[in-house]
Image (cartoon, rainbow, N blue to C red):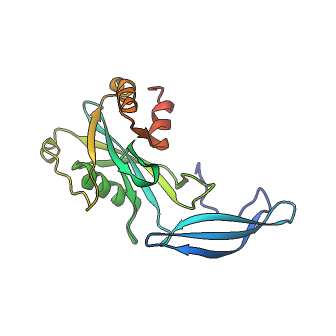
Amino acid sequence: MKLFSEEKTPKIGSSHILNETILFRGHWTQMVELKYEDEEKKIRKWEAIHRKKQINAVAVVAQLKPSNRYILIRQFRPPTKSYILEFPAGLVDLGEDIHAAAKRELLEETGYFGEIEKQSPKLFSSPGITSETISYVNVSVDENYYKNKSPVTNQEPGEFITVFLKHPKEIKEFFITESKQGVMFDAKLYTYFMAQEIL
């Protein structure tokens, strides 16, 4: 039995989009005004942001085996005006499947090769403002594999990523130390470790 349905037709309410108008188009994103009808048949408007190519994203929860250390990254995220601690992540290229994207992003950002263990359905990261979806992909990384002994990153221009390897017992103190340095946290990362009862 499937836990999550791919069915797109709403069956729990009558609200629906009537149309959308582009308000601003940038290099990577566009702001739109959505006109929709609510449950009371009232016409309302909402501003939202789409990625221009409507592509999905992936967050890679990678763990080294047998040490069980997690692979975390820190990088500057301009919209937040801050350095952010997060999981390796990125966009799924057009025509690329989510598993391939997860392996590629992990390799590019951290230099590690891994094998897929499981994947979440597409999830909305901030549904009040953006249509972007993201999938969690759990990846097992064999630290005894020769290419993982001296990982080499292939970061894109403008990416300045610091990689951290942290055992679950180190996470809480590590987060405290990072916070004291003004580092902020990606919600996906923080809630993952809260759910694991590590924080």
Image side of residue 139 versus residue 195, left or right: left
158 shown above or below 63: below
Residues 167 and 139: in front is 167
**Residue drawn where x is 30% and y is 48% of the image:** 115
Residue 102 sits in quarter: bottom left
**Residue drawn where x is 25% and y is 62% of the image:** 157
Residues 171 and 129: in front is 129
Image side of residue 27 versus residue 62, left or right: right
How far across and down, in percent of the image, does residue 146 sit? 12, 44
**Residue drawn where x is 40% and y is 71% of the image:** 94
The answer to whether residue 86 shows anywhere in this view is no
How far across and down, in percent of the image, does residue 162 sit? 26, 44
**Residue drawn where x is 61% and y is 64% of the image:** 48
Residue 87 sits in quarter: top left
35 shown above or below 145: below
How far across and down, in percent of the image, does residue 54 sit? 50, 69
Residues 42 and 150: in front is 42
Image side of residue 138 versus residue 143, left or right: right
The answer to whether residue 117 shows anywhere in this view is yes
